[in-house]
Amino acid sequence: GNQTFTMIKPTAFKKNYAGAILKMITEAGFQVKAMKLTRLTAEQAGTFYAVHKGKPFYQALVEFMSSGPIVAVILEKENAVEAFRNFIGATNPENAAEGTIRKLYGTSLQQNAVHGSDSDENAVIEADFFFSKMERF
Ligand code: ATP
């Protein structure tokens, strides 16, 4: 697939990192195809992370992801899902490579600055969750 979905998580947005993060993303060759500032309800965050339901971190993650505005973005690049996951760094910012978004802007395993789709299938599901046809370019 040539598209992936990302979110700038609430803490990173609140700290005003959105501009710097989007600059890194576009300079790495990812093209923005859709973008919005929005806020998830707890119910929506629960649906978005339903795959993690039952895990010990699920409830806190849902609360965190609905705690403030997020920036939702569809990105295009060759092999987008894998390229973006490699680009942002490991899930835990402590383990992320130097210079990656999660290393630079993440503050904890939960508050790791950005989301990145983990498969082409989920990229489509997640993009459709946030964007209508007329919001994509
Ligand atoms: P994302 O799906 O956000 O791109 P990921 O695929 O790297 O992240 P997942 O394992 O899918 O990581 O977990 C989804 C999110 O849940 C992580 O980004 C992180 O914010 C949170 N998370 C995962 N594991 C833990 C944990 N053990 N404790 C707290 N939060 C966690």
Image (tube, rainbow, N blue to C red):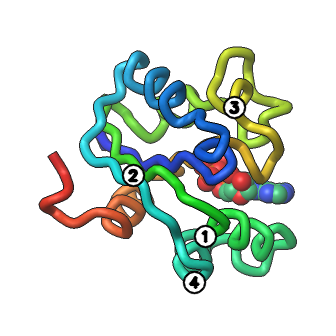
Label 2: element kind: helix
Which image quadrant for residue 137?
top left
Say the numbered circle drawn on residue 105. 3
**Label 2 or label 1, whichever comes before in sequence order:** 1
Task: Find out whether the residues at labels 4 and 2 contact each other: C-beta distance under 8 Å.
Answer: no
Q: Residue at x 36, y 65 (%)?
A: 130
Q: Which mark is residue 66?
A: none
Q: Which residue is mark 2?
A: 120
Label 2 CB-ligand 1 distance < 8 A = no
**Residue at numbered disc 1:** 49
Disc with the residue nearer the chain's start (4 vs 1)? 4
Instruction: Report if the CB atoms under discs 2 and 3 are less than 8 Å apart.
Output: no
Distance, label 3 to label 1, CA atoms, is: 21 Å
Find the distance from the CA under tag 4 to the CA under tag 2: 24 Å
Image height of 22 relative to 52, above or below: above
Nearer to me, 31 or 64? 64
The kind of residue tagged 1 is Tyr
Dot 4 or dot 2: first in sequence order is: 4
